[in-house]
Image (cartoon, rainbow, N blue to C red):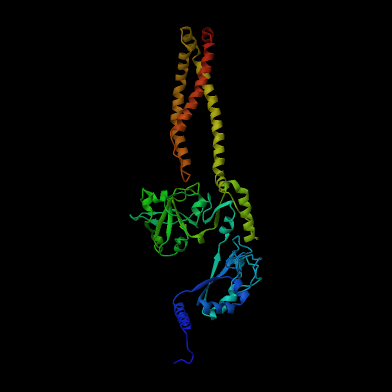
């Protein structure tokens, strides 16, 4: 018999605590927590409370964040908890609550990200040694608040990340093995959630990446997911692109250590480069924001100025030491296309010069024929030939050199134009229309010159023509 009787409530409480303690040894019982909790109540006290009340054995410590949901006290407008400092943290700034090491950021835009909220405090240096004594593991985590900060403004419609800035060459490989052992090398595009809205992609089948399905977390696991475009789906052997959804594709030989990927969606083709790169086939979208560097922001077309102001203000708040570097996709295209635009201007100038020379040559050729056949034309006129007949006579004289010139020029022009169009990622089909139009234009010029020559010929007197023979 125990000297101190235990009622039913105390017994159940003790048993629950004992079971929780046993369970904690075999599983992770964690909590997200910010530095402000340790500063307000003391590191040792916080660790004791977490272990006594919740058997916590793991801390997910907010180390880099600009969000005040975890790193700060209660969000203004919400009730305070039953512990800690009972006032709002109105001077919250955010940043890196550990000690940044500049040498690791020298080639990045992150220059001054130390959180000023708690002076020179290094929260990892403060918490890790004491947590270790309590047998508590510590994981650092970073919180991306860019998306939420920007989306608060109605001028910003979507925010995502990618490793490919539109119209900028960023080569990469993601080799896939087909069922017949052939290897395809699509262009990999690493993205975050919401990428399809930011890039304006249209889904032909399947779904997009979502946090609910945990696609970003699965990228390094045994069952990663991908989205492919229409070109890649068909190259993989699925003429009906919807049949590609749910299929598992093996990685190629030199990536044999990588797990196979499962296709969860198919989108329409969207080029990101002007020129093809090393015969890449289509695009594969991989939900891996850790491999991205480019922030994609889609603005409301009617509120562009407001959207830019939101971007600049948010950037200045989150990274005051680094100037914002933003560019419209249309400007990026113009920058990438500048060589082709210059090339087009040069070709246009050459075409104008060639047209002028051709016109002068046709006029000179017409004058030569008119002079050489002036007696014949005068005689035919005396014998009653019509203007149409004489024009036909002159045109037949022009036709043979014109036909020979076209037969010589057409193959050369076709080969040059086809080679030029093939330099683009999505080449334009070359039809016979440009050549037909060129012949029509040349024929029109020759017809005008022939008409003028015929008019002159009708003014030639036979005696004058014979006299000069």
Q: What x and y, as percent, mark residue 56? A: 51, 76
In the foreground, 205 or 261: 205
Q: Position of residue 342 (x, y in %)?
A: 57, 41
- Residue at the spot x=55%, y=78% of the render? 49
| Residue 421 position within the rendered picture, expressed as x and y whole percent measured from the top left | 47, 41
Is residue 95 left or right of 161 when viewed as pictured?
Answer: right
| Nearest the eye: 100 or 58 | 58
Identify whether 66 is placed above or below 82. Answer: above
**Which residue is at the far left?**
180
Q: Quadrant of residue 179?
A: bottom left
Q: Is residue 344 above or below residue 383?
A: below
Relative height, residue 453 to residue 67 (above, below) = above
The one nearer the camera, 379 or 238, is 238
Q: Residue 411, position in %: x, y?
A: 43, 34
Tell me if 261 is positioned left or right of 37 in this view. Answer: left
Is residue 185 visible to the viewer in this orientation of the structure? no
User: What is the quadrant of the N terminus in the image?
Assistant: bottom left
- The residue drawn where x is 60% and y is 52% is 326
Q: Is residue 429 visible?
A: yes
Q: Residue at x 48, y 44 (%)?
A: 424
Q: Nearer the viewer, residue 106 or 59?
A: 59
């Amino acid at each position: 018999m125990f000297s101190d009787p235990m009622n039913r409530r105390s017994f159940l409480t003790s048993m629950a605590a004992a079971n929780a303690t046993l369970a904690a040894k075999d599983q992770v019982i964690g909590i997200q927590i910010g530095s402000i909790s340790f500063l307000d109540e003391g590191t040792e006290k916080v660790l004791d409370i977490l272990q006594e009340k919740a058997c916590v054995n793991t801390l997910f410590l907010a180390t880099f964040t600009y969000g005040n949901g975890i790193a700060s006290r209660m969000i203004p407008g919400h009730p305070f908890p039953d512990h800690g400092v009972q006032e709002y943290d109105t001077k919250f700034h955010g940043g890196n609550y550990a000690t940044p090491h500049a040498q690791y950021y020298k080639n990045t835009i992150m220059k001054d990200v130390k959180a000023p909220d708690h002076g020179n405090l290094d929260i990892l240096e403060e918490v890790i040694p004491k947590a270790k004594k309590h047998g508590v593991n510590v994981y650092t985590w970073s919180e991306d608040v860019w998306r939420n900060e920007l989306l608060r403004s109605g001028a910003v419609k979507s925010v995502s990340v990618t490793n490919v800035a539109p119209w900028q060459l960023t080569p990469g490989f993601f080799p896939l093995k087909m069922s017949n052992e052939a290897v395809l090398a699509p262009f990999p595009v690493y993205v975050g959630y919401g990428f399809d809205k930011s890039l304006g992609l249209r889904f032909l089948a399947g779904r997009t990446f979502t946090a609910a399905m945990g696609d970003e977390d699965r990228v390094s696991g045994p069952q990663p997911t991908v989205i492919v475009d229409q070109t890649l789906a068909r190259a993989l052997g699925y003429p009906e692109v919807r049949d590609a959804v749910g299929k598992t594709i093996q990685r190629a030989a030199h990536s044999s250590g990588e797990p196979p990927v499962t296709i969860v969606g198919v989108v329409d083709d969207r080029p990101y480069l002007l020129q093809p790169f090393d015969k890449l086939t289509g695009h594969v979208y991989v939900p891996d924001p850790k491999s991205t560097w480019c922030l994609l922001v889609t603005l409301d077309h009617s509120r562009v100025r407001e959207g830019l102001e939101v971007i600049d203000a948010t950037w200045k708040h989150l990274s005051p030491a680094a100037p914002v570097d933003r560019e419209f996709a249309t400007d990026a295209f113009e920058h990438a296309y500048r060589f082709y635009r210059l090339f087009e201007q040069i070709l246009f100038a050459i075409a104008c010069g060639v047209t002028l020379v051709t016109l002068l040559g046709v006029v000179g050729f017409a004058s030569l024929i008119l002079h050489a056949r002036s007696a014949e034309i005068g005689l035919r006129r005396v014998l009653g030939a019509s203007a149409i007949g004489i024009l036909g006579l002159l045109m037949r004289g022009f036709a043979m050199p014109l036909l020979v010139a076209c037969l010589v020029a057409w193959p050369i022009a076709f080969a040059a134009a086809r080679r030029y169009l093939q330099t683009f990622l999505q080449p334009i089909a070359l039809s016979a229309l440009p050549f037909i139009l060129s012949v029509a234009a040349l024929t029109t010029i020759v017809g005008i010159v022939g008409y003028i020559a015929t008019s002159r010929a009708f003014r030639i007197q036979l005696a004058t023509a014979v006299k000069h023979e």
